[in-house]
Image: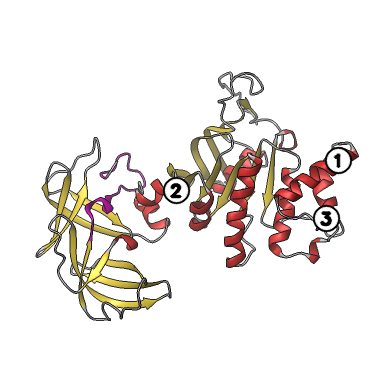
Amino acid sequence: MTETRNVPVRDDPDGPDSALPAIELSGVVKEYHAHGETVMAVRGIDVTIGQGEFFSLLGPSGCGKTTTMRMIAGFEELTEGSVFLHGKDVSDVPANKRDVNMVFQSYALFPHMSVFENVAFGLRRKGTPKDEVKKRVGEILEIVDLTGREKRRPREMSGGQQQRVALARALVNRPRALLLDEPLGALDLKLRQQMQVELKRIQREVGITFVYVTHDQGEALTMSDRIAVMNDGSIEQLGAPRDIYERPATKFVAGFIGTSNLLTGEVGEVTGEHAIISYGEDERIMVPLGTGASASTGDRLELTVRPEKIEIGTDRPGDENGSRVRATVSEVVYLGTSTNYHVTTASGDDVTVFLQNATNADDIAVRGDVVWLSWEPRHSYAIGTSDATTTVGAP
């Protein structure tokens, strides 16, 4: 790197200030130059990750999440900005000198070595005494539930077990943070879901900061304490899984996290607490106004409501204080635990409804039926665009 860094002095992470973040990114930018063009992979990210936190970078392919992780690890050079690990600027520190370990999707185990030797490899290279190696390998194998399999070779193990070996090898060195780049991507669905629960359990037991890269929203929602949703090199929203799912800040987040219905309408009336969109004859959508937010008559709002929040029926809803919209059923899909209704409103919006199959009742409606959709006002949430700085919605 040719630039001279001007960064603030940080407290000694080994000193009395135990509140230092595990990882901090300050104004981090990554540019690539090829064929006379500049590609911005990461666009000025600022984020703080707490000690012992399970933090996920979530987004589609090419959004910059892996590049961000590689800059934390030291495998990619920063164009601008700084990376701090426990208060120390490590922006110019090589990867092998940073107190972090990384786990990849490919596992990268040594096929000729036993489980014990794979896990002990890093400790032996550091010259750790033999008794200490045996003790620490035994402890970490117990945590990842591989006790009794020390003598097996990787080829004799399932994909999930190999992934646990890779985790044990990374954790046995006791790094201050563990970086995981889509480590479950090679597993089948059922095993991947099992490993999500196991990863969270392991992270809680060892108490180490985990930074997890994934494009799978289910993985991020299942395991994370906080999620940074990335798009085109920027963080669109940062928050707890529930907040991101229930209150998406932008249209991109609403569409990327789970299934979301996006509706657009004009505000016909504003009460003290709600903007009311007149959606058609005897139809309306009520959108809560959050603290500091406002809407005026004639404003056009884009809003989202989740499929599981909507009730569907052939009779007009009786609740005069809720949202209600008429629609025509275009498709009915039975999925065992739920039935999904795909409907189209009179204004042309496509809406999906998830109805839990709690009883053995017949389908509420079939294709071609006219139905009513209804939901509580608090489940409507107005959203902004990717470059919006404020949104209208519940706080």
Q: CA distance from mark 3 to mark 2?
A: 37 Å
SS of the residue under disc 3: loop
For the C terminus, give its image quadrant.
top left
For the N terminus, give its image quadrant.
top right
68 or 309: nearer the viewer: 309
- Residue at the spot of label 1: 125
Q: Quadrant of residue 160?
A: bottom right
Q: Which amino acid, mark 3?
A: Glu
Q: Main secondary structure of the magenta part?
A: loop
SS of the residue under disc 2: helix
Magenta stretch, residue numbers: 375-393
Residue 345: where, in percent of width, then height? 21, 68
319 or 66: nearer the viewer: 319
Please tell me how crowded label 2 is: few (under 14), some (14-19), or many (20+) other residues with Cα within 10 Å.
many
Say if 362 sits above or below 270 in the image.
below
Residue 208: where, in percent of width, then height? 64, 39
Please tell me how crowded label 1 is: few (under 14), some (14-19), or many (20+) other residues with Cα within 10 Å.
few
Q: Which amino acid, mark 1?
A: Arg
- Residue at the spot of label 2: 241
Report the number of discs: 3
User: Depth-wise, is mark 2 or mark 1 nearer the camera?
Assistant: 2
Tell me which label, 3 or 2, sits earlier in the chain: 3
Residue depicted at 68% across the width and 45% down the height: 102
- The label on residue 150 is 3
Is 279 part of what is drawn in magenta?
no
Tell me which label, 3 or 1, sits earlier in the chain: 1
Residue 393: where, in percent of width, then height? 26, 45
Q: Quadrant of residue 173?
A: top right
Please tell me how crowded label 3 is: few (under 14), some (14-19), or many (20+) other residues with Cα within 10 Å.
some
